[in-house]
Amino acid sequence: MGQWVKACNLDQVKKGQLLGFSHDDKKILLANQNGKIYATDLICTHAEADLSTGFLSNEGIRCPLHLSVFNLENGVPQNLPAEIPLKIYNVKIEHNEIYVEI
Ligand code: FES
């Protein structure tokens, strides 16, 4: 079991938005896909692009650098060049605040 860390308020990640945050040495991406909040590693597994500048769609998060798309449920890349899944974190919402299990 990890430690639950407060990331931000729910209204800071509106539908279709991305937000990066750091906790200690971890860099995490929050994504609001159709009203559901997901948390993944912020940095692309291929060549270390910052995914908070990527593009969110129904397919997942698209890396801004080489355009691999990662599924937000399991982190698995849907297309090359990325081959390594993104790490996915558990998320909970309490009192309009987003918490991530790190
Ligand atoms: S850095 Fe993300 S696909 Fe290359």
Image (cartoon, rainbow, N blue to C red):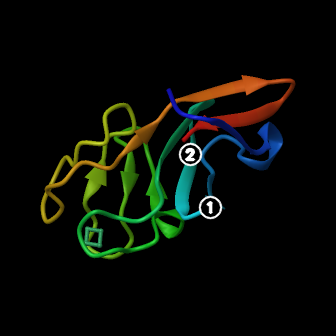
Nearest-to-viewer mark from 2 and 1: 1
**Cα–Cα gap, marks 2 and 1:** 20 Å
Task: Point out residue 2 in the picture as x, y percentages from the top left corner.
Answer: 53, 33
Task: Point out residue 33 in the picture as x, y percentages from the top left corner.
Answer: 54, 37
Residue count near mark 1 (Cα–Cα under 10 Å), binned few <14, some 14–19, many ≥20? few
Q: Quadrant of ligand 1?
A: bottom left
Residue count near mark 2 (Cα–Cα under 10 Å), binned few <14, some 14–19, many ≥20? many
Residue at 61 percent across and 37 percent down: it is 100
Indicate the secondary structure of the residue bearing disc 1. loop
- The amino acid type of the residue labelled 2 equals Ala
Check disc 1 and report the residue beneath it. 24
Earlier along the polypeptide chain: callout 2 or callout 1?
1
Indicate the secondary structure of the residue bearing disc 2. strand
Check disc 2 and report the residue beneath it. 31
Is 84 rendered above or below residue 32?
below
Task: Point out residue 26 in the picture as x, y percentages from the top left corner.
Answer: 53, 59
| Left or right of 6 on screen, residue 27 | left
